Amino acid sequence: MTKRRLIVLGVAGLLAATIHGLSAQSPTSPARGTVLMGTVKSSTGQPLEGMTVTARGSNKNIKTTVFTDEQGAYYFPPLAAGSYDVWVQAVGFATDRAAVQLSTNRTQHNVSVNAIEDFSRQLSGAEWLAALPSSTPQDARMKEIFRSNCAGCHAASWVLQNRFDRDGWNKIISNMERVSIQGGGPQEMDRAPQPWLRFNKDELADYLAKVRGPESRMNFKPFPRPKGEAARAVITEYSTGSSEDPTRPVRFDGSDWSQGIPTAYEARGPHDADVDPRGFVWIVYGDDTAPASRTYGRLDPATGEIRDFKITNARGVVQGSHGVKVDPQGRVWFNAGGNLQMVDSKDPALTLTTYVPPREMGTVGGHIQISPQGLVWAASDGGIMFDPATKKFRRFDHPWPGGATYGVGADKDGNGWWAQMGGLPYDELGKADIATGKTYSIPMEPIPGMKELATPADMEFYKVAGSQTNMAPIWAQGPRRMMGDDVGYMWTGNWWGNNIAQVDIKTFKVTYRAYPNKEHMGIYQPVPDKDGNVWVNLMTSDRVARYNPKTDSWTEFLLPNRGTETRHMAVDNFKPQVEGWTPYWRTNQLARIQTRTPQQLQALRDSAGQSVASAR
C-alpha cells in the first residue's frame, strides 16, 4: 500500500464557478432566479410536444435542457439572470437558435420551427440501424452481421452517416481489421487482422454499398419524441473539456444534431462516474490506449467546477482508468495502472491510497463494484476481491478457462459476479461464493431466432472464433456489466440481446427483460436505485432508460446530444429524489437526469405566474 499527494491539473479555468442556478438546486426548488418559459409551435401554428429546448449561459460550459409538454409549452428551473444561447431541436425540424437575455423575474421565449426533408444526420445510431433493410432473409442476416461487427464500440450512425461505393467500403473494413477497437490511431500492419471482420468483409462491403452507396436511399422513421414523465425531465450537461487540452471545450460536442455524430475522438473522455454522499461526482477518464493528461476528476454540480488529477507510472506516463465506485462511507474506489486506488471524499487533502494485488493474482481490471458489506470487487478474468478491513485481496477464477471477462458485480450477500462476454466459452455469468471459495457458471440463452438466420459457414466459423467484446455471433447475448439489488437479484446488461437479465442469486434462474424498442439500443450498465427501479444507459441511441420491475414497464429519457456513446450509468441515491448520471465518452460531458412530477411542474408554472403579477 502506498500513499501520495494528488497532482491537481490546472483546469479550474475550464468551468467558471458562476454557473446558472439549476446546478445548485433541484428542479423542484422554489423559484430563486429567472424562469425561462415559452411555447414551441410548427410553422403552421401546431403546438409541438417533446421538443428539446436547451439553454447555455454565454461562454459557459454547462447546458440545461427541458422538453415541451402536450401544449408545446416548456418551463426551465430558475436560472441566474444573464445572456443565454437558447436552441430548439427535434428530428425532422430545423434547429432554431436565439440569444435570450433573462430578466430578474420571468422571460418568455416563443419559437416557431420549420420541418426539413433531410434529417438523417439528426438521427441516433439506433434510428440509423432501424432504417437498414431487412425484408429478405439475406438482408435480415446482413443487418445483424453489421450490428454485431460494426456497432460494438461505437454507434451505427458513426459508420452509416458516410457513403462509399463497394471499393470504398472494402477499404474501410480492411483498415478496421488492423486498428484499435475504438477505430482510432494508426493502422498496425504487423497486427493480425480481426478474424470476425475478415470472415464477413466481402459480404459487408456488398451490403454497405447497397444501403449506403453513392445513390442509395434509406427509409428513416424517427423514434417518438418524449412525452409524459420523459417530457418533464431536466437534463444538465457538464463539459469535462477536451482530453487533448482540458482547458478548452470539445470542438464538436454533439449539441448540434444537424452536424451528425462527431467523427473524431478527442481521446480519453469520461468513462465511468459515481456520486459521493456530499454530492460530488467522481469521474475516471478513458484507458491506456492514448496519450493523456488526467486519470480521474471530481465535479461539483453546485458550481460546475471540475478538479482533475493524474497518476503516473515509473516512466512518467499518465495512467488511465475505466471504472469507479463510491462506497457508503464516501470512499472512492477505482482502477489505474493495474492497481486498486482509493480516495476518501471526506479527506480535505484528498490523499490517494494505492493497493497493489499480489503478482500471482493478476491485476485490478477496469470495472469496480462495492458489496453492501463494503467488499470491493473488480474484473480480472474472473473476479478479484479486496477487503478494506483486512487490506487483503482474493482471486476467483471462472470454472473453466477460455472466456473473457468484461463486467463485475456484487450481490446482497457480498458474493462476486462477473460477465464472460467474449472468448470461448462466451455468454456466461460467473459467481464466486466467498464462504466456500467455489465458483459457478450461469449460461445465457442465445437470442431467439438469430441462429435461424445464420448460414452453415457462420455456425462453423463461430465454433472456432467464439465472441469478442465488440464483435460477436449474431445470436450472442453479450452480458456486459452488472449490479446487484437488495432483494436478491443480479441485473445484467445484455449488450447484443437488447435486454437486461434478472438473475436469482440463489437459484440462478435467468429472466430476460426485453427492451420495448427491438433495435440495438446499446444496453450497457444496469443500476438499481433505492426505489426499486433499474436505470440503464443506452449507448448507441443517446438515451437513458429506467425499468420498473413491479409494473414491468420502461421510461426512456432522451439525451440532448448526438454521439454520446455513454459507457456507464450511476444513480444518486443520497438525495430524497433519485437522480441519474451518465458520462458521454465521445463528446466529453457528464449528464444529470432529474425528473419533475406534474405537481412540481405546476408549482413552477404558478411561481412563474406570481413573478409576473408581482412585477406589474
Image: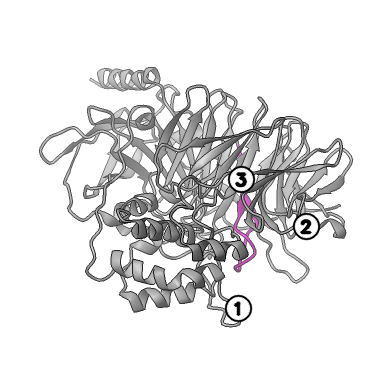
The secondary element bearing badge 2 is classed as: loop
**Residue lying at 40% horizontally and 35% vertically, measured from the top left:** 80
Q: Which sits in the foreground, 485 or 230?
A: 485
Would you call the spot at circle 3 few (<14 residues within 10 Å), some (14-19), or many (20 or more)? Answer: many
Q: What residue is pinned by disc 2?
A: 363
Q: Earlier in the sequence, mark 3 or mark 2?
A: 2
Q: Note whether residue 356 is visible.
A: yes
Q: Which residues are magenta?
A: 280-297
Question: Real-space Cα distance between discs 1 and 2?
Answer: 25 Å
Q: What residue is pinned by disc 3?
A: 481
Question: Real-space Cα distance between discs 1 and 3?
Answer: 29 Å
Q: Earlier in the sequence, mark 1 or mark 3?
A: 1
Residue 208 falls in image quadrant: bottom left
Q: Position of residue 404 (x, y in %)?
A: 67, 57
Residue 6 falls in image quadrant: bottom right
In this rendering, position of residue 485 left or right of residue 21: right
In the displayed structure, 376 sits above or below 177; it is above
**Of circles 3 and 2, which is in front?**
3
Seen as rendered, the residue at the extreme left is 44
Residue type at numbered disc 3: Arg
